[in-house]
DNA sequence: GCCAACGTTGGC
DNA sequence: GCCAACGTTGGC
């Protein structure tokens, strides 16, 4: 089992939005970054743990838990010319953008903020979230980091 | 709203 | 293949 952190802007799609979806499940569409795509396409397995992170908001941080809920499959918006996610260079026979579904698990009792995570950077070790200039929207989390971050919730 | 970081694009 | 221009991300 692998662990991940996935960023979302709450104004666009929040953890509450995920919770309120039918089956509490949503395709993680709109990813147009190759590194993030590769994680979804090559490394994610059904049941993998997901830290749901709110970015670009008042208090950026981890707000809850989700899980990978599907095998990888093509993002349909890449073929829709009306969509802002349309990619005219994606070949339907060999789709460029691949996603997985994400299912809601629970909210944390409180937000574990980026500020707080940074304060524990030394304990967390190498972590994409706290690396300088990090812009990845999907990143791997080690088991140790997962446990540590969820432990912070209770402090 | 600002701006640093950084990925992508396209001319050459 | 280089690299300047440009667009986006995302913290602050």
Image (cartoon, coloured by chain):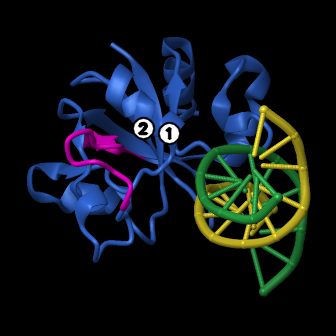
Chain colours: A blue, B green, C yellow
- Residue A32 locus on image (x, y percent): 46, 51
Within 10 Å of disc 1 (Cα), the crowding (few <14, some 14-19, many 20+) is few
Determine the residue positioned at 16% across, 51% down. A24
A96 drawn magenta: yes
Check the image and report above or below for B2 versus A144: below
| Secondary element type, mark 2 | helix
Instruction: Where is residue B1? Give x, y as percent.
Output: 78, 86
Query: Which residue is rendered at x = 26% and y = 50% of the image?
Result: A75
Q: Which SS class for mark 1?
A: helix
Residue A135 against residue C7 in the figure, above or below: above
Q: CA distance from mark 1 to mark 2?
A: 5 Å
Over which residues does the magenta segment extend?
A87-108
Q: Which quarter of the rendering shows the N terminus of chain A?
A: top left
Q: Check the image and name the residue furthest to the left.
A: A23
Q: Residue at image x 41%, y 69%? A: A12
Disc number for residue A63: none
Q: Which mark is residue A37?
A: 2
- For disc 1, the marked residue is A34
Chain letter for mark 1: A
Q: Residues within 10 Å of mark 2 (few under 14, many from 20)?
A: many
């Amino acid at each position: 089992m692998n662990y991940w952190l996935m960023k979302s802007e709450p104004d666009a799609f929040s953890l509450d939005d995920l919770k309120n979806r039918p089956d509490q499940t949503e395709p993680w569409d709109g990813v147009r970054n190759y590194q993030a795509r590769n994680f979804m396409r090559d490394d994610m397995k059904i049941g993998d743990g997901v830290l749901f992170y709110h970015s670009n908001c008042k208090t950026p941080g981890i707000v809850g838990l989700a899980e990978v809920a599907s095998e990888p499959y093509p993002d349909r918006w890449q073929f829709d010319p009306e969509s802002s996610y349309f990619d005219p260079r994606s070949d339907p026979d060999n789709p460029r953008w691949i996603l997985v579904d994400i299912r809601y698990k629970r909210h944390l009792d409180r937000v574990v903020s980026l500020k707080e995570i940074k304060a524990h950077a030394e304990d967390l070790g190498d972590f994409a979230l706290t690396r300088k200039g990090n812009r990845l929207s999907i990143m791997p989390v080690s088991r140790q980091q997962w446990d540590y971050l969820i432990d912070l919730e209770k402090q």
